[in-house]
Image (spheres, rainbow, N blue to C red):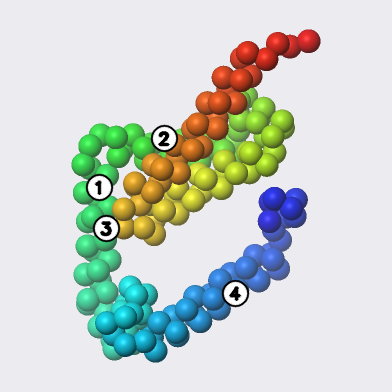
Amino acid sequence: MQYVNQRINLRKAIVLVIGTILLLAIVAMIDLHQPAELQSHLGKNLNLIINGNYREMFYIITRKLQMQSRVINYTIFGWVLLGALLASLYVIFRPGKVLSGIRNTFPYIYKGLKGLIIAAVVAIIFNDSGLTAAASLFIYSMLIIGYYHGERRFIPTR
């Protein structure tokens, strides 16, 4: 919505959420009607919920959290990335001098940066190896900021 310069009001947010839920429901229904060996993770997990196997769901969630913890604790860089990502979240919503320059000069690039950082956070939350996906997304955002900052230094002011 930001790319077409439209504000997201409550009505649009509700429509987006309902549309997303409907799309997921359609995909889930299609997945549930497939044979068990062809079902995706979504279909298999929905079958667990439908059959009341909540303990197995709890184990799946616990295993996923343990895997995230292992990936984060594998090296110090996992914690560095998390810290940098949290700092980037703060900076992107409260831009300082460099990001204000990007926001004013290149508003679409700034919106793209915001999207990359939010996508990195979502990847950490919803993906098994979310830290790897977040690192990949984070690299692109840092390259854009670094490029802009380097270019700004070498552009003569009049």
Q: Residue 65's mark?
A: 3
* Dot 3 amino acid type: Leu
* Dot 1 amino acid type: Val
Query: Are there few (<14), some (14-19), or many (20+) residues within 10 Å of tag 3?
Result: some
Marks 2 and 3, how far apart at CA: 21 Å
Q: Earlier in the sequence, mark 1 or mark 2?
A: 1
Q: Earlier in the sequence, mark 1 or mark 3?
A: 3
Q: Residue 18's mark?
A: 4
Q: Residue 98: horizontal and vertical position, in percent?
A: 60, 25
Q: Of tags 1 and 2, which is closer to the observer?
A: 1
Quadrant in the picture for residue 6: bottom right
Marks 1 and 3, how far apart at CA: 10 Å
* Dot 4 amino acid type: Ile
Asked if the residue at tag 3 contacts the one at tag 2, i.e. Cβ–Cβ closer than 8 Å, the answer is no
Q: Residue 71's mark?
A: 1
* Residue on which disc 2 sits: 84
Is label 3 in a helix, a strand or a loop?
Answer: helix
Depth check, front residue: 52 or 103: 103
Quadrant in the picture for residue 148: top right
Q: Of tags 1 and 3, which is closer to the observer?
A: 1
Give me the residue at 57% from left, 19% from top: 150
* Dot 2 amino acid type: Ala
Marks 1 and 2, how far apart at CA: 16 Å
